[in-house]
Image (cartoon, helix red, strand yellow):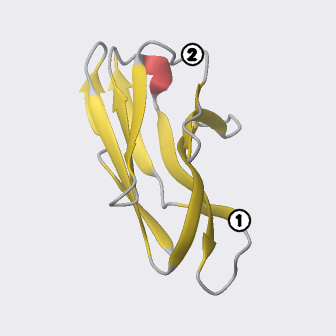
Amino acid sequence: VQLQASGGGLVQAGGSLRLSCVASGRIFRINVMGWYRQAPGKQRELVASFSNTGTINYADSVEGRFTISKNNTENTVYLQMNSLKPEDTAVYYCNAVMSTVSIHVAVDYWGQGTQVTVSS
């Protein structure tokens, strides 16, 4: 089981980027998919999450600018980031709480991280 993230890059302030993350492998159930970020010298923080019950959470700092969505059929989660600010610069990590076919216990899985850089 693995998560593959893509879509990061360099953008000017006010611009937009869209991140994608695909979960693959012998997945039994995905409980939550979401995005975290970690800026240099700071702790990793939740950006947005989307549960299998439909609950969506956003960090206060991105509310109204970022939108999380998912495609359950393709086990994919997206993060549309608009009105980007220099303080959004960070490595963004895809996260999923999911169980596998062989072990029906939900645990955290992480993608490899994708760099988002917003220039002023």
Q: Nearer the viewer, residue 6 or 63?
A: 63
The CA distance from mark 1 to mark 2 is: 27 Å
Figure check: 51 above or below 81 = below
Residue 21 picture location, percent across and down:
39, 54
Q: Which image quadrant: the C terminus?
A: top left
Residue at x 53%, y 44% (from the top left corner): 34
Residue 53 picture location, percent across and down:
59, 42
Mark 1 or 2 closer to N-term?
Answer: 2
Residue at x 69%, y 82% (from the top left corner): 103
What residue type is disc 2 on? Ser
Residue 91 picture location, percent across and down:
49, 43
Figure check: 20 above or below 103 = above
Q: Nearer the viewer, residue 36 or 10?
A: 36
Residue named by callout 2: 61
Q: Is residue 4 left or right of residue 1?
A: left
Q: Is residue 90 left or right of residue 67?
A: right
| Label 1 secondary element | strand
- Location of residue 84 (image quadrant): top left
In the picture, the disc for residue 120 is none
Residue 50 picture location, percent across and down:
54, 40
Residue at x 54%, y 37% (from the top left corner): 54
- Badge 2 density bin: few <14, some 14–19, many ≥20, Cα 10 Å: few
Residue named by callout 1: 107
